[in-house]
Image (cartoon, rainbow, N blue to C red):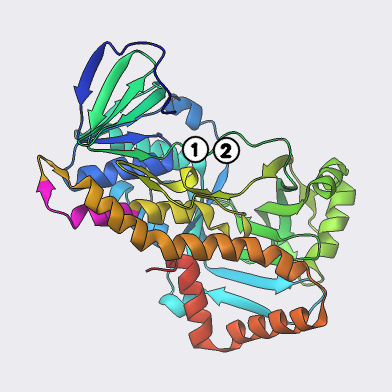
Amino acid sequence: MNTAPPNIAPTRSTAAPLLVLGGGPIGLVCALLLARHGWPCTLVDARPVQALQRDRRLLALSRGTLDTLAPLVGTRFAPRGDITRIHVSSRGHPGSAWLGAADFDGQPLGATVWYADLVAALAQAVQDEPLVRVLRPRRALQVRQSTAEVSVELDDGSLISGSLVIDAEGTPPPRADATHCAVLAELEVQLEAGAAIERFTSEGPLALLPLPQDPGATAGTAAGPWRRVSMIWCLPAELARERYALDEGQLCERLGLALGLRLGAPRSIGPRTLFPLHTHRLAEVCEHRIVRLGNAAQSLHPVAGQGFNLGMRDCRVLIQCLIDDPLQASAPDALRALRRYATRRRVDRSVFPALTSALPPLFASRLPPVVAARSAALLAIDLLPGVRRSFTRLLMFGAAH
């Protein structure tokens, strides 16, 4: 999508009050939230929904994201793995913290779902929603803005127009020059049900997440039963490629050293994926009648699993800003709503990119003052209920909840 002069003349024009570009989870959620408030919209995506349903990425959803999704697709919208406890620690240094559902009336802190399952549930909800018109597969070629409206030229020569374009198309394909990569795999470790691990090492953060609807566990020891989990190990690119190329026994040994004696080495590792890591953040997400959400606005380091959840908060706040304006000609006052949206999202969009960028180098540092400070911080989170609840609430609901 760009704003260059078109190569072909549009053949027909269709008016739609609100336009959503991108049919992944963020775009689908936006369309559903708009429809729930009585606003018709048109959703455009270049990919058939079947292509999205072949994507087997694992998503970590925060409590706030689950609360947003539940009214749209139901409380059991997809097979999911509830996260009831999160253990945060630093390899080789004192101090660790358990964040738990016990601090929040036993409600899970979040859950994992397969990307394909979430898309399937959201796509079905959109299909059942008469106020959402879906154009798939259609690619947006040009976006033109005027004082009163914005129009989008599609690859079939048609033109659609409205008062607002919500760009949820995401980021360009990963580049080959990534300085860091994530090694992804499923493995078996001794771990209690519902537990997630965030283990910081001098090489990079290592996360273990429960799988959706784990079919069961086999006998283990006092450390816990053997369970299959998803691993995300973020490393400098050259080191990531070296670890990716190790045989299963060698990688299990390396993981055992990283995880420490409490968890020990995994007993098996499934097929691996090497994923280049890139981050970006737009300083301004609103451009007259265009607003960019989710990965179109920012992408984060995967530490703490906040990227998708930040995009979901983008959706929720945008809809709230639209609600706050009186309706005009069946659509909200887009310009006033977007000014308010940019202001309300500024803190959350600044805090989490800064936090996720700072944590890996902070925990990789071996400087004695830094080691002492981070150990004290983990100890405070673990032992002081008020600090622990505030930090957990930040992860569940964001910086502007």
Which label sits on residue 116? 1
Q: Tell me the distance, in whole angstroms, between the alpha carbons under discs 1 and 2.
A: 6 Å
Vertical arrangement, residue 224 with respect to residue 210, above or below: below
Which label sits on residue 269? none
Q: Which of 393/140 is in front? A: 140
Q: Taking 9 as reference, is 373 left or right?
A: right
Quarter of the rendering containing residue 303? bottom right
Instruction: Say what amino acid the circle numbered 2 marks.
Output: Arg
Which label sits on residue 56? 2
- As for residue 388 lying within the magenta part, the answer is no
Q: Taking 19 as reference, is 399 left or right?
A: right
**Residue furthest bottom as drawn:** 384
Instruction: Say what amino acid the circle numbered 1 marks.
Output: Ala
On the image, the x and y values in percent for residue 359 come to 66, 66
On the image, the x and y values in percent for residue 85 come to 56, 70
Dot 2 lies on which element?
A: loop
Q: Which of 175/144 is in front? A: 144
